[in-house]
Image: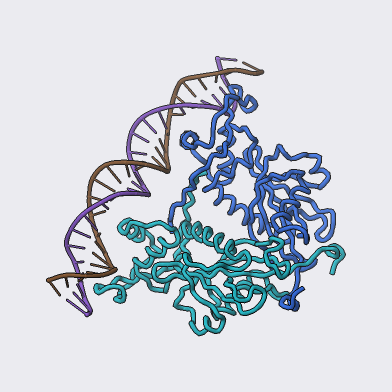
Chain colours: A cyan, B blue, C purple, D brown
Amino acid sequence: MEEFYKDKERFYVAVDCIIFGFCQGELHLLLLKRNFEPAKGGWSLMGGFLEKTESINQAAQRVLFELTGLDDIYMKQVGIFGEIDRDPGERVISAAYYALMNIDDYDPELARIHNAQWIKINELPVLIFDHQEMVDKARILLKKQAATEPIGFNLLPKLFTLTQLQMLYEAISGDALDKRNFRKKVKEMDFIERTAEKDKSGSRRGAFLYRFNDRKQKTVLKFNF
Amino acid sequence: MEEFYKDKERFYVAVDCIIFGFCQGELHLLLLKRNFEPAKGGWSLMGGFLEKTESINQAAQRVLFELTGLDDIYMKQVGIFGEIDRDPGERVISAAYYALMNIDDYDPELARIHNAQWIKINELPVLIFDHQEMVDKARILLKKQAATEPIGFNLLPKLFTLTQLQMLYEAISGDALDKRNFRKKVKEMDFIERTAEKDKSGSRRGAFLYRFNDRKQKTVLKFNF
DNA sequence: GCAAAAGTGTTACTTCTACACCCATGA
DNA sequence: TCATGGGTGTAGAAGTAACACTTTTGC
């Protein structure tokens, strides 16, 4: 170790994951009921400590993998949380990430093992530490980012109906959308394509299934100051 | 210290500041030429180590204060940088913040003391470690945020002309704006008000000076997916 | 009197919003 | 045959984009 760093403090560094899922017209979070101290019995985000052998982004992926067994999940940094007393046990600096996943990809058996549950975002229990603050920041970020980049698809199955897609964007944005205007807009997006298949589960008539193809998309950024 | 944390690693945690200024129609960054190891002689962002007694946001403010003597500067988290080898001296996790300040508020004497310089953002030297990556991310963020929130004023003096304001937004967005359309839009914003004063330095005729009043503003967020 | 920046409106075009009915099917 | 969700078009309003000349004044 070099001279320069000698007198500096070192800190525990953690990652916490805000894991979004979508079903039945509502956003959900995957939360854990802790069966260990500190805050045993409390609801929390999935988290873990940074290790020497990994970058912080890798740590976030690892932590998510430990919980879900999945390694190709869309993740994004939310921010760094570093209040002195945010974790009453010890001084811990935490990097928060949000993850977007399709609930159907999650093995319920793993949920049982980890004491995890999908909970509607509008019916969250009290969370430990500053986890509610992390969730709030993640929701705002998700809303902003979903408005300018096509990331919503990470919350849906590979094939989805337009009704599902509309409900998803209504859930993210918090506003109702007009069905005809919504579908008109979707038609103009060449990265959403209709398949020949229909989903008959939601109605007698059946709805066409659509798919996201990752054709590049211009991001529009309008200046309102 | 509690049992739970015992076997966890601890890390150095730093903050690095991307300090934006604006003059002569161009964005600038305040950079330091390091006269200490590691990377002595290299150009770098202003940084410092997190201390036990402060939150990470406070650390960012402190570090900025050390360099500028100013404590009311607009700052925003850019992200956390945690690659294993990002600092070749030691493993350091760094939280990057951008800061927006009026160049005129900066005492040139402090620049001399710290070996600091304002450098045009399009003429940056090679930066140490991953600082260029931090700058790139900060610029993208600034552009996005300036498009939806009135934060640009932090880069201008209290009184400014419309030409200055337009040049600022052109510098941030990277696009030329139409003068008449720009001024029309400004007229509709009730948080920008004209004063009776004129600035005669930029032209013989003189230009009216405007001021930002912090009246609340609706943030528009249009969904393009 | 001229150079240099400040200031000012109109029109065509694009995009957005609001709105209501028929369709296909399984039970 | 009927209940349920799927699917479709138009017209008025709002916003955006393109465009050129006059004003002021110090030198």
Give how far across and how far down residue B49 sits, in percent. Answer: 77, 59
Displayed quadrant of residue A160: bottom left
Q: Position of residue B208 (x, y in %)?
A: 57, 27
Image label count: 0
Left or right relative to B88: residue B217: left
Q: Is residue A16 left or right of residue C26?
A: right
Q: Nearer the viewer, residue A116 or A191?
A: A116
Can residue A197 be seen here?
Answer: no
* x, y percent for residue A40: 63, 76
Rendered residue at 44%/77% (across/down): A104
Give percent across and percent down for residue B8: 73, 76
Farthest right residue in view: A3
C15, A146: nearer the viewer: A146
Q: Is residue A202 visible?
A: yes
B29 on left or right of A223? right
Say which quarter of the image contains residue B136: bottom right
- Above or below residue B56? Residue A115 is below
Relative height, residue B154 to residue A173 (above, below): above
In the rendered view of the protein, which quadrant contains the N terminus of chain A? bottom right
Q: Left or right of A100: which side holds D1? A: left
